Amino acid sequence: MPMGRRGASRQRDILMRARGWMHGGGRDRHAAMFYRLPALLTACLALSGVAHAAPPAPAQGIVAQIEIDGNRRIEDATVLSVMRLHAGSALDATVARSDVKAIYGTGFFNDVQLDLQDRDGKQVLVVHVDEKPAVADVRLEGNKKVDEEDIREVLDIRTFAVLNDADVKKNVEHIRDLYVEKGYFLVDVQTEVQVVGVDQVELVFHIEENRKVLVQRVDITGNENVPSSRIKRFMKTKEGGAVPWLTSRGTFKREDLDMDTETIRYVLLDEGFVDASVDAPKVYLSPDKRFIYVAIHVNEGPRYEVSGVDVVGDFVPEEGLTHAVATEVVNGALVMDIQEQQWREATGRKLRRGPARERAAAVKVGDTFKLTTLQAVVQNLTDLYGDKGYAFANVVPLPYPNPETKQVEIQFQVDKGDKVRLGRIEITGNDPTLDKVVRREILVNEGELYRGSLIRASRARLQRLGYFDKVDISTPRGDAPDELDLKVKVSEQPTGSFSAGLGYSNLERITLTGNISKNNFLGLGYTMSGAVNWSKLRRQWNASLFDPYFLDSRWTLKLDGYNITQKYQLDEFQRGATIAIGRYLDQRDDTRLTLEYTLENVGLTSLDPFKSHILGGDLYRNGLTSSLGVNLNVDKRNNRIQATKGFFASASVKLAGGFRTSPDTVVSVFGGDFNFVEAKGNLRFYQPLIPNRDWLVFRLNSTMGGIWTTDGSVLPYIHRFRAGGINSVRGYDWFSLGPSLRSPSTDDPAAGDSRLVVGGTETWINNLEIQSPIVKSAGIAGVVFFDAGNAFGDPWGQGHISPAGLRLAYGAGIRWQSPMGPLRFEYGIPINPVEGERKSVFDFSIGSFF
C-alpha cells in the first residue's frame, strides 16, 4: 500500500540525517526549500526496499504530473519553463534542488517548496510558490534636473506587474545611465518598497542628482609631432567649453573614453607612427566633485614611409581584372575599368576615349604611411571587383614594417570569391509611397550581376528625393548559393504641409496666408502645391502639379495656374497658366530638357494720367502674353528638398509673340500683344564647410537674365526685371531696385517729381549664405547672408550688367521647417543706402528660397 505522508516525513528525516542534510549552519535558502521534499525521498526509500509491504507500482520513481500551487499572476508555463523535471522524467534529488534554485532565480517568488505526492500509485510533484506582490505604482522622488517624462521613457516596470528584484536593479541602471548621459556622473539612485494593500506595493526610486560633472580638461602628453587639437577632433570625450549647457559637450562616459584610446592609436597610425602606443587614460575628480580631468599619455615612436607596394591574389584578365589594372587602382590612376554603358549609369557622365579615369586615394613608394589611405585603397579595389559581380571580394592589406629602416612594405591580398547575381528586390517601409516610385530610382534589376557602385548610387538617388528620412540597403543571401537579394528599407518622412496663418511685415502689414503642398502626392512622386496670400499690397493664388515620370515614362509633365495682384510700385496684375513637357537626357535623371508654353494676361489695374503718357504710352501698356520656351536643368543636389551638398543649374530661353521681319511687318508666331525674347540662367551651389558634416553649409544662388523686344518697341513695365525684397536682394524693399525715371506725381506744377522704378532689361542677383541648425530636431536653423544684385538697362533698353552697379546688403535670419511649411524671418542691412532708402529691413516669407 502507498506510504502515508507522516511515514514519508519520518523516512525523509532519517535519510536526511544519514546524508548530513539536516538543518545546520552554512546551508543556503534554496537548499532549505529543497529539503521540504517529503514524498520524493519516500519514493527513493521505496525503490531501495525500505517500504517492502507491497510491490512497487510500474510508475514508481517517475514523475507522472507537475502541478503549480500559489501563483496568481505568474503563468504555470513561466515556472515549468525553468524546470528540468517534467512529466515522465525520473526522480532525481540533484535536479530537484537545481529546479528550486531556478524557480527562485526568476525573481517572482519569495518562497519555493516542492512536494511529491503519491496519488493512486502515481507520483505527482506539486510546486508550492509564494508569489511576490504586484507593483501598484512607480514613483520618482528627487529628480529636478531631468524631467520625469524622460526618466519614465527608460523605465520598463509596468503597474500591476510582479515585483522582480532583477528588474528593479536593471531600472536603477537605466536611470543612472540617463543621468550620466546628461553629465550627472555622481547620481545616486536608491529604491524603496512600500506596502499599500493586500499583495500590492509601491516602488519608489529616490534620486540624489548631485552636481553635474563636466570634463574640464583633456591633456594629451607625449605627442611631439601630432598636435593635440588634431587628436581631440576625433575623440568622443570633449571638454565642456564655455557654454556646455547648450550642447552635450563635456559629458563624461567611461565607455567613450575607452574607445578614445583606440581612436588616438588610429590617428597616430594615420600620421605614419606604426609603433605608436597609448597608455591607459587617467581620470581625476576635482575636490568639489564638479569637474573631471583626463590625462592620456602617448608614445609616438618613429614615423614610417612606404618602401614598396604590390597586389597579389586572384586576377581575371578576360574581365579586365589584371595585376596592371589593380596596380593602377592602388596608385590612384584608375578607380574602375568598366564598359561605357556601365560608366554612364554609375556616374551620369559620358565616357571619354580610353578607360574611365579619375583621381583617387593612392599608396605610393616614398609616401608617409597613412591608415586612411590604406583603407580607401582597399575600398577602391573592392569596388573594382564588386562591379564585375564579385560581391564577396575580400581585400586584405598586409603591412610589413621594418623597424631598422623605418619603412613599411604593403601587400594587398585579393580573394575575389564567386560571382553572384541579384535575386529578389524587396522594398519595405514605403507607406504611402508606391513601390514603382522606389524601383525607378534603383539602377539594378533582378537577375543582373551584382554591381556595388550602382547599388550605392541607388541609395543616393532615393535619399535625394527628400521623401525618406532614412534609406537602408542590404544584400542578404538569396535562394541560390550564387544569389543575393536586395532589400531596400525606407523610413517615410513628412513630405507635405498645410498652413493657414496670420502674419505681419513692415511693408505688407497684416498678411493672411494659406498653403498646401505635397512633394509625394498620392505616393506617386507627384509634387502638388497651392497657396493663397492676401495682404494690403499683395493678393495671390496659385496651384501647381508636377509629375516627374509622366505615364511611368522618362517624360515629365507640369501644370501651373496663377492669379497675382500686387501694389509694390504700381497696381499690377498677372493671370495665366503654364504647361511644360520635359524629357530626361541621362541615365540618372539629373539632366532634363523641358518645353514650356505660357499664356497670361498682364498689365496695370490703374494708372494716373501722367504715367500713362510716358514713352508714348508704350511703357505701361496691358496685354496678352503668349510664349514658348526651352529650359535645360541639371540637378546634382544630394536632396532635392533640403540640399546640403551639390548644385542645381538651369538655362532657359523663350520667345513671346513673334518678331519683326521688315519695318512694316511683324510675324506673329504664338500670338499675343507682346514680342520679346527672354534668356535666364541660374546656379545654386551647396557645400558643407566642414567635410562630412552638414551643420555648417555654404549656399550660393546666382541668377542672370536679359530680355529684349523683337519688334523694336519699348519693353513694357510688367515684363521688366526689378530687384529687392526677401526673395531677391534682402535689406531693400520689394522691387525698389532697378532703373528709374522722374515722373510728376500731381498736376500741380509746383510739386516736385517722384522717382519711379521702371525696371531693367538685364538682371544679376547673387545670394550667399551660411546656414547652421540651431535646434535640429525642431527644424530651426540660423543663417547669415550677403547679397549683391540689381536690375540694369534704362527704359529704352540701353545699358548692360555692370559689377559696379550691384547693390549690396548683409544680414541674418531664422529658418523654421514648421508643420505649416518653411518659414523665413530675415533682417537685412543695405550697404551705402541712397537717399530715401531705409537703413534696415525686416521681412518674413513662407516657402523655400533656394
Image (cartoon, rainbow, N blue to C red):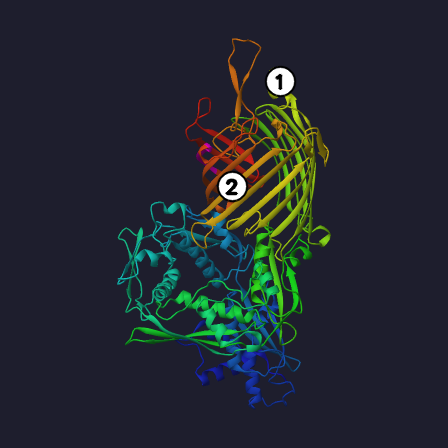
Residue 83 image offset from top left, x and y in percent: 56, 75
Q: Amino acid at mark 2?
A: Ser
Crowd rating for badge 1 (residues with CA inside 10 Å; few <14, some 14–19, many 20+): few
Q: Earlier in the sequence, mark 2 or mark 1?
A: 1
Quarter of the C terminus within the rendering: top right
Residue at figure coordinates x 63%, y 90% from the top left = 55
Q: Nearer the viewer, mark 2 or mark 1?
A: 1
Residue 519 in the figure: left or right of residue 302: right
Main SS, magenta residues: strand
Residue at figure coordinates x 57%, y 12% from the top left = 746
Q: Amino acid at mark 1?
A: His
Q: Nearer the viewer, residue 383 or 799?
A: 799
Tell me if residue 825 is in the magenta stretch: no
| Residue linked to disc 2 | 702
* Label 2 – label 1 distance at C-alpha: 36 Å
**Is any atom of residue 74 visible in this view?**
no
Residue 198 image offset from top left, x and y in percent: 54, 55
Crowd rating for badge 2 (residues with CA inside 10 Å; few <14, some 14–19, many 20+): some
Figure check: 61 above or below 300: below
Give the number of the disc on residue 790. Answer: none
Residue 186 image offset from top left, x and y in percent: 35, 54
Residue at figure coordinates x 54%, y 9% from the top left = 749
**Is any atom of residue 44 visible in this view?**
yes
| Residue linked to disc 1 | 613
Tell me if residue 808 is in the magenta stretch: yes
Q: Nearer the viewer, residue 455 or 798?
A: 798
Figure check: 843 above or below 333: above
Range covered by the magenta-colored residues: 805-813
